[in-house]
Image: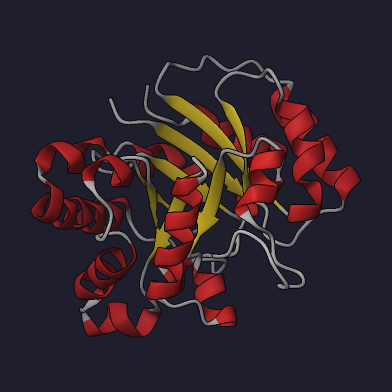
Amino acid sequence: MRKQIAAANWKMNLTLQQGEQLLDDILSKHYQFTSHQQVVFAVPSPYLAAAQAKVKGVQHVFIAAQNCYNKKSGAYTGEVSVEMLTSLGIECVVLGHSERREYFAESNKFLADKVDIALEYRITPIFCCGEPLSIREAGTQNEYVAKQLEESLFHLDEASILKVVIAYEPIWAIGTGKTATSAQAQEIQAYLREVIASKYGQHVADSISILYGGSVKASNAKEIFSQPDVDGGLVGGASLIATEFEAIINALKQ
């Protein structure tokens, strides 16, 4: 079975003390994890070391960076390199989030470079793709997200792409309170799997986890995660509330 992942994206929220308390609250609960389930916390860069210490020795739980740069080192003030992440023991990084694309003009090619360097350092990319409202209303979302995959991931060989986690996020449903219906999420995530299969074959497509991100919360997680091509969620606002994220973790497929 594909990995089922509940990934928290804290974005630019919480103080260090608040973040540590949130982790303590969530990790204090008893979860019946199966071998294919994972929980990931993508925390702000200043908190990576503290968060990593919190989850040390906790099975099925990982800390992720929210971003990295596409260079190993150098005069790039304010950026975070994969070497830095590796030195902290970080195993995952979120790449291509819609906010990075929109506010920081990250292109598909730039993200391809980031994917490459993350994989070089054995860090799992959680690669985000998704369409804005104008594209959804025009009915061209399939072509839009397919292009994101093709230009950022399809240069990879089979062994490499199998190490990538994909997160589909309808941009119009992030932080807006709007949520794609479970049928809409299933439809486009099944399409993404078809696109991957056309390049790499069905076996590879069936092995890659595809998460849904877009106003996932405790009240809708079970229904969304029940869809056959949805393998968990990349969760924003609800991941900042312990009881909400606990419920989302428990909504993962068994």
- The residue depicted at 45 percent of the width and 25 percent of the height is 37
Q: Is residue 18 left or right of residue 66?
A: right
Q: Position of residue 162 (x, y in %)?
A: 30, 40
Task: Give the answer, above or below, for where 88 lies relative to 200.
Answer: above
**Which quarter of the picture shows residue 185?**
bottom left
- The residue depicted at 21 percent of the width and 79 percent of the height is 140
- The residue depicted at 13 percent of the width and 55 percent of the height is 199
Q: Position of residue 137 (x, y in %)?
A: 28, 82
Residue lying farthest to the right in this orientation: 17
Of residue 186 and residue 80, the one placed in the foreground of this image is 80
Quarter occupied by the C terminus: top left
Of residue 207 and residue 213, the one placed in the foreground of this image is 207
**Which quarter of the picture shows residue 54?**
top right
- The mark total stands at 0
Task: Give the answer, above or below, for where 85 lies relative to 95.
Answer: above
Q: Is residue 229 left or right of residue 167?
A: left
